[in-house]
Image (cartoon, rainbow, N blue to C red):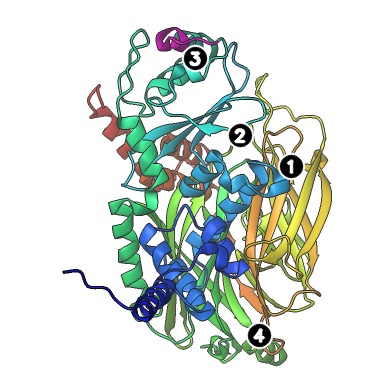
Amino acid sequence: MRHFRSLPVLLLCFTWCASTLSLHAVSPKNLPPYFRQWIEEDVPYIITQDERKEFLRLQTDDEREKFIEQFWESRNPTPHSPINTFKEEHYRRLAYVRANFGDERYNDGWRTDMGRVYITLGPPQQRSNLHQGISTRPVEIWFYHSPTPALPPAFNLVFYKPSETDNYKLYSPVSDGPTKIVTNDEHDDAKALRTIDQSMGAEATHAMVSLLPGEPISVDHPEPTMQSDLLLEAVRSLPDQKLEKERIARQRAASREVVTSRIFTGFNATELQTVVLRDSRGLSSVHYLVRKEQPDAGLIGVLPDKRTGYAMTLETHVSTEAGKAAYQRVDHLIGQTSPAGAIAGKAKIFAAEGRLPLVPGSYVIEAILTNEITHESTRASQHVVVPAPQPDSLGVSGLMVYQGRALQTSREQLPFTLAGLRFPPRGEQLIELHQGDKLPLVYQLWLPRPAQTTVGASPKAAPRMIKVHYTLGSIALSSGDPNRVEGDEEVSTTDADDAGNLVSGYTVDTANLRQGTYRLVLRAIDPSAPRAAVASMTVRVLPSEAPVDVWTAFGDEKLHPEWQDNLLRGIAAEALEHPDEATGYYRRVLAAKPDATDAQSHLDALLKKSEHKSPGE
């Protein structure tokens, strides 16, 4: 016997079901513009499917704001740190792909295959441009050391241009195959592969059959395995890979804990701000600020000799991303203040300055600042990447904001010193100010280096103009932002040093900015380089009564002579398991200071270790 419901009941049921569905999901098209851009353009490659569904079920903007805050915090390498290096790096990558991929008119670089990979994995460790092949299409090969255990330890990704007007497409050895790379309508993979081998070389030949460098291939009988396509699928779905989801879950749990770990005594939390700079020899150092979040009147008091001043110890530990200790250094920050200076200093935010000589690699830096007057200590840490020089590409350091005026100095080892000028720092990565405050920036451009053709220093290229564009606006950098500030300038390469470092600066006017958080992005274009260099920082405009002025102090660099820089770089290279690089630095130390026992003992241990290695190691 059939049973029929009355029409009103059916309509009621339909209405209830529809309202229930609406409570469970909102189409991205129906979201306010800010949240729509966030879910569709800012984070589509780093958000998990479960998180996306959860976000689209939210019903109010307040709920969405809280979700976004927790989303970034769950990925913060240092939970509750005011500088979230994951978020900072993500928006730097987003700015880079908008500047270098796709059509700039449509701001669609993030939609391209290259943009997606760059946002997901970051810059490759090596990038081979194979654009001039005979009978082959333009190809780029990006090599990665895996940033996550969810992917193989090392792999290649190949991009090719199907036509001159197309964007680069991510290549699959299985679904594309070598015939997609050649231009002579070849339908035989083996013949196409031989053409690639003759035109592009062995590296490209192997990558067309396998994206895994260690996987054996046959040029005459190319038969790609499914391992390459499994890799590509893992890259495309990285946020939903099991190991990645477990990592995010661990960080989310950590972020929900009460934050006392980084303030083990005292009440005034600190943050660590860093910028990587290169000296006149092209060697890298991390310049950093250990910055109090609020003024701390207890930092200035009566010293043991009854004078008024400050006495602090800055202890900094450097370890690799894998957790292996490299080195630590201790700086003593001691000074006197006048009565007026003491009153002013107690109302300002304090930041301790430091500098760490390092070689290219990935590190964790932890700084402990101890007030020797009150014996209170605070701790801050940050993940830092020191980039390797890229001979064929323009690079740019992080952006620094300085205060006062630059001071001439002959001591290149002082913190925040560039080209013989010391720039008293106010902040980097993140800067807080009042509406209308000037924002004086300084940064380094790292120029492409001409090929070495003679014995001695590399020759300088002919002078040229670098075009620099500045954009300051909302975090999403939407072109419709009414507070958006833009500026352009050209910088001559004439004043670059022998290492290709060029110091430049720019002052940004913030008169039109209301209270809020903004993103400052610098984009530099060198006519001799294939792609733009991008740097960025976060700018917070605070209420007029909020403290933003900063005073700083640093240790006596005379305690750290120049030869010690090479010793510390050698120790860092050794911690990164780069023995040849470490050996080179230790030999430089001994050439300058033959009685440097630390360098000699490190060198002896490395040489002894290499002697005991088997031939196959």
Query: Between marks 2 and 1, how big is the CA–CA gap?
Result: 20 Å
The residue carrying mark 1 is: 525
What kind of residue is marked 2?
Answer: Asn
- What count of labels does the image hold? 4
**Residue depicted at x 59% and y 36%:** 390
Q: Secondary structure at mark 4?
A: loop
CB contact under 8 Å: marks 2 and 4 = no
Q: Residues within 10 Å of mark 1 (few under 14, many from 20)?
A: many
Instruction: State whether residue 81 appears in this view.
Output: no
Q: Circle 2 sits on which residue?
A: 167
Query: Label 3 vs label 4: CA separation?
Result: 60 Å
Q: Earlier in the sequence, mark 3 or mark 2?
A: 2
Mark 3 / mark 4, whichever is N-terminal: 3
What amino acid type is highlighted by mark number 3?
Gly
- Of all residues shown, which one is farthest toward the front? 1
Residue 192 located within the stretch drawn in magenta? yes
Q: Position of residue 453 (x, y in %)?
A: 67, 19
- Residue 547 marker: 4
Instruction: Measure the alpha-carbon separation of dots 3 and 1.
Output: 30 Å
Q: Residue at x 64, y 53 (%)?
A: 535
Q: Which image quarter: residue 42?
A: bottom right
Residue at 35% in and 37% down: 231
Q: Nearer the viewer, residue 222 or 287?
A: 222
* Picture quadrant of residue 299: bottom right
SS state under label 3 = loop
Residue 201: mark in rendering: 3
Determine whether the residue tagged by mark 2 lies in a helix, strand or loop: loop
Q: Earlier in the sequence, mark 2 or mark 4?
A: 2
Q: Position of residue 27 (x, y in %)?
A: 50, 64
The amino acid on which the numbered mark 1 sits, given as a three-letter code, is Ile
Q: Are marks 3 and 4 in contact (CB under 8 Å)?
A: no
Q: Which residues are magenta?
A: 185-193
